[in-house]
């Protein structure tokens, strides 16, 4: 039986106070959708299938290059992070897996950590390696690169770390490794542009060779930071070329914040899906650059357009199943509240994309009717599917309003007592 962090009776009390209003809204939406030939029950069942992983580091307070302001009761180690992740899943019923980051989350007893996750009703998504920071006691520095470093010893150290992550992930039940490096240059001529990528591919081959047969390697690209002149894996084209070079188990990972402003991310999604190399997503939102804002907080229409392409890819290939994860930095909000809200927004885009009338859209496209093609998408996007999402949570044992239920539970105040601040312990792991 799954252990509930928040008393189930409290959640039920919350739901009882909102059930009648939800039913009225649900019935009204159902009537409107019925006139469009859409079955609300089918959409609700579809919503219940949606799942997005939460990042272990996301439940801690983030920071900037200038400062970090710790939040009260933030987790100090990986076991406390799992407790917070369990709260998110208990209330949203959409986040059943956690993505760990090593060495930030390296457990002393991996089997015990997996048992804790099992008891909390959680599993483990892809594990993440870290060769963008020097760790205490490591022999070689990553100041001038890791998988692409001029130093062979530094490259070998980075490869060995990734292989260690795979071994830990196997014990935890993970099936994937996400590789992101901050490697690159800050000055023209600092390194040979072609040579750096050659070294990356050579190092990546060593990691790829260690993958179990049923694992995937997710290659994450980023336009800039900390390499401000030239990042080695800077765009989807480079990521795609590397994935093609490595083999079938190598896929491309798309972080929504890792692109130049105004980049057509949905087109990138379509291209990678077309050629079988779309592995998954890190969901967040962006205003200026890699802002790591809450999903859907800036450009929810872009999020919808991404899921529109994913829905199209699924129709073309029923086996298509990319990995979804939230990757955000919460500096001024309660991280649990932000992650719950983001999970709901990503789920919203998933359901809205299912509302697109594909036959009508195809007809408009074939007739070169640009306006009606756009309106077909806008019709789905403008539909408020909130009652569907709330009903899906209710039927799956979650909370009608996750943030309200969370605040009413007093969880943050309770853990603030149990988790006094500890010097050097950051839930985010970043700063």
Image (cartoon, rainbow, N blue to C red):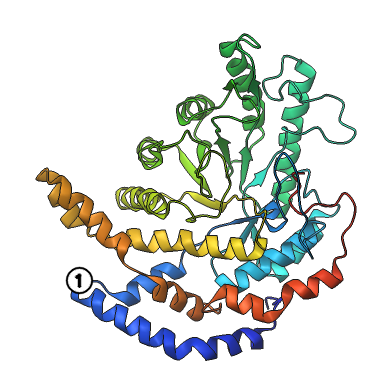
Question: Residue 296, percent across and down?
Answer: 47, 56
Left or right position of 303 against 201: left
Nearest the camera: 405 or 195?
A: 405
State the residue at coordinates (38%, 38%): 264
| Quarter of image, res 273 | top left
Question: Residue 303, percent across and down?
Answer: 42, 52
Does the rendering let one see residue 294? yes
Does the rendering let one see residue 96? no
Q: Is residue 61 above or below residue 148?
A: below
How packed mark 1 is, by other alpha carbons closer than 10 Å (few <14, some 14-19, many 20 or more), is few
Quadrant holding the C terminus:
top right
Residue assigned mark 1: 36
State the residue at coordinates (34%, 77%): 41
Count of labels in the image: 1
Residue at the far front: name it: 66
Left or right position of 89 against 303: right
SS state under label 1: loop
Question: Residue 188, percent across and down?
Answer: 60, 11
Residue at the far left: name it: 367
Question: Residue 75, percent across and down?
Answer: 78, 60
Nearest the camera: 280 or 181?
A: 181
| Quarter of image, res 162 | top right
State the residue at coordinates (49%, 25%): 238
């Amino acid at each position: 039986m799954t252990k509930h962090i928040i008393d189930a009776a409290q959640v039920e009390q919350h739901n009882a106070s909102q059930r009648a209003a939800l039913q009225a809204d649900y019935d009204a939406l159902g009537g409107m959708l019925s006139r469009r030939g859409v079955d609300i029950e089918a959409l609700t069942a579809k919503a219940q299938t949606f799942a997005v992983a939460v990042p272990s580091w996301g439940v801690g307070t983030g920071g900037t290059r200038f400062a970090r302001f710790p939040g009260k009761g933030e987790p100090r180690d990986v076991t406390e992070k799992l407790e917070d992740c369990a709260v998110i899943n208990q209330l949203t019923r959409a986040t059943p897996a956690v993505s760990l980051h090593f060495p930030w989350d390296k457990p002393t007893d991996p089997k015990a950590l997996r048992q804790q996750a099992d008891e909390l009703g959680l599993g483990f998504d892809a594990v993440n390696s870290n060769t963008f920071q020097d760790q205490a006691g490591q022999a070689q520095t990553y100041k001038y690169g890791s998988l692409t470093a001029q130093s062979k010893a530094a490259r070998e150290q980075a490869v060995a770390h990734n292989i260690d992550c795979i071994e830990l992930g196997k014990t935890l039940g993970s099936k994937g490794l996400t590789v992101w490096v901050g490697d690159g240059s800050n000055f023209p001529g600092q390194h040979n542009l072609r040579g750096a990528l050659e070294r990356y591919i050579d190092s990546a081959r060593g990691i790829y060779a260690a993958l179990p047969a049923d694992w995937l390697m997710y290659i994450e690209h980023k336009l800039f930071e900390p390499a401000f002149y030239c990042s080695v894996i800077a765009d989807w084209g480079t990521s795609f070329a590397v994935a093609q070079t490595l083999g079938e188990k190598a896929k491309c990972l798309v972080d929504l914040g890792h692109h130049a402003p105004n980049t057509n991310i949905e087109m990138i999604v379509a291209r990678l899906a077309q050629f079988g190399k779309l592995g998954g997503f890190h969901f967040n939102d962006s205003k200026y650059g890699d802002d790591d804002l809450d999903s859907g907080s800036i450009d929810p229409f872009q999020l919808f357009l991404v899921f529109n392409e994913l829905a199209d890819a699924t129709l073309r290939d029923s086996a298509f199943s990319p990995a979804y994860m939230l990757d955000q930095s919460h500096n001024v909000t309660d991280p649990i509240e932000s992650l719950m809200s983001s999970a709901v927004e990503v789920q919203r885009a998933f359901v809205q994309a299912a509302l697109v009338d594909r036959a009508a859209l195809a007809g408009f496209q074939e007739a070169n009717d640009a306006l009606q093609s756009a309106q077909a998408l806008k019709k789905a996007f403008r539909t408020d599917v909130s009652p569907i999402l709330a009903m899906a949570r209710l039927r799956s044992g979650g909370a009608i309003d996750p943030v309200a239920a969370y605040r009413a539970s007093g969880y943050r105040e309770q853990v603030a007592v149990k988790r006094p601040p500890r010097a050097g312990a950051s839930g985010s792991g970043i700063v």
